[in-house]
Image (spheres, helix red, strand yellow):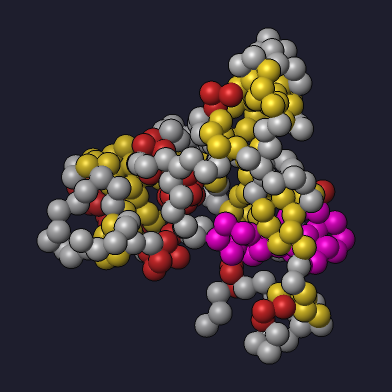
Amino acid sequence: MTDPRRHPANGRVAALRLRGEVEAQGFTEGVPARVVVPVADLLRAPGGPRDRQFLLGEEVTVYEERDGWSFVEASRDGYTGYLPAAELSGVQAPTHRVTARATHLYRMADFKTRELAALSHGAMLTVTGQEGRFAVTPLGYVPSMHLSPLEEVADDPVRVAGLFLGTPYLWGGNTSYGIDCSGLVQMACLACGIDCPGDSDMQEAELGHALPEDAPLERGDLLFWETHVAWVVDRDTLLHANAFSMAVSYEPLEAAVHRIEAQGDGPVTSRRRLGDPR
C-alpha cells in the first residue's frame, strides 16, 4: 500500500515520476524552493494537523500552489504535505548550519541589539562574510560560533540529541523549541550526515540493522516500540523525547521499558544499530 506521507500526489497534481502509477489532472517535475521562516509546520492538509516541521533554509519541491498553500515534498526525507506559500521562496542555497542548540539572528553585529528571530539547531543560512564575531547573512547577523559549514558533520548522534535535553515535547516537532521522539532521532541523524525519515515506523524499517536479542546494547543504538523510539546512551540509560516527562529526558533503560509496557504501549519491538553490520 502506498504511504501518503511520502507520496506527492493529491488528485489535482502529482510528481512527474508517478505518471502511470496514479491518477491526477496534471503531472509536473515541480519547482525547488526553500523555507524562509525560522520554523514551518508541514500540514497533512491545508489548515490540518501537523505531521512534521521544517527549518529555515530547508529545501522542498513545490508541485502546486493553491489558495495560499503549497503542496510540497521535502528534499531531506520525501515527506509530503502542505506549507503556507508565503513561507517559501526561491532563495540562494545555504552554506552553513546552526550547530548550537539555538541561536539568534541580529540586525547588527552587536549582541546588545534587539534580535530579529530565534533559530533552532539545524536551521541553515547563507554566509556571505564575517564581521567581528558574527557571520554576515542576507537575513542578518549570527554568532559565528553557533554555525558550521554544511559539509562538516557531527560524529555522535547521541551527543547531538543531548543538545535538546529539556526541550518540551511537541507532537511532530523538529526544533529546540519543541520536539517529539522521531524528531529527536531525525535531527541527530541529519546532523551526522545520516539519511533519516521523519516518523518512528519509517525509522524502524529503514535505519541501520536489527540486533539479536542477546546482543549487548551500545551508545547510538535505537530502541523501538509500536509508536515510540529512544536513543541508547549506554547499556543502562535512554535519551528520548517522551510524553511521560513532556520533554527530552534521560531515563533508566530498564525502568523505561517496564513503564512503557505497563502504560499500555507494548514491549520493545526492535533494537537497531546504525551503520553496517559487524
Would you identify the image quadrant in which residue 48 lies?
bottom right
Q: Nearer the viewer, residue 84 or 124?
A: 124
Residue 130: name its quadrant. Answer: top right
- Please provide percent x and percent y for residue 88: 77, 50
For the C terminus, which image quadrant? bottom left
Q: Residue at x 37, y 54 (%)?
A: 229
- The residue lying at 66 percent from left, 63 percent from top is 73
Highlighted range, magenta: 62-85
**Depth order, front residue of 91/24:** 91
Name the outermost residue toward the bottom: 20
Is residue 69 on the magenta stretch?
yes
Asked whether residue 232 appears in the rendered view, the answer is yes
Q: Residue furthest right?
A: 67
**Going by the image, does 266 lie left or right of 17?**
left
The residue at the point 72 percent across, 13 percent down is: 113
Q: Tell me if residue 211 is in the magenta stretch.
A: no
**As drawn, 180 above or below 77:** above
Predominant secondary structure in magenta? strand
> Is 233 on the left or on the right of 163, as rendered?
left
Q: Where in the figure is residue 85, as x and y percent of width and height?
A: 81, 53
From the viewer's perspective, is 270 left or right of 47?
Answer: left
Extreme-top residue of the structure:
112
At which x and y percent is residue 198?
A: 51, 58
Residue 254 in picture, x, y percent from top left: 20, 47
The correct choice, above or below, for 216 with respect to 207 in the image is above
Residue 262 falls in image quadrant: bottom left
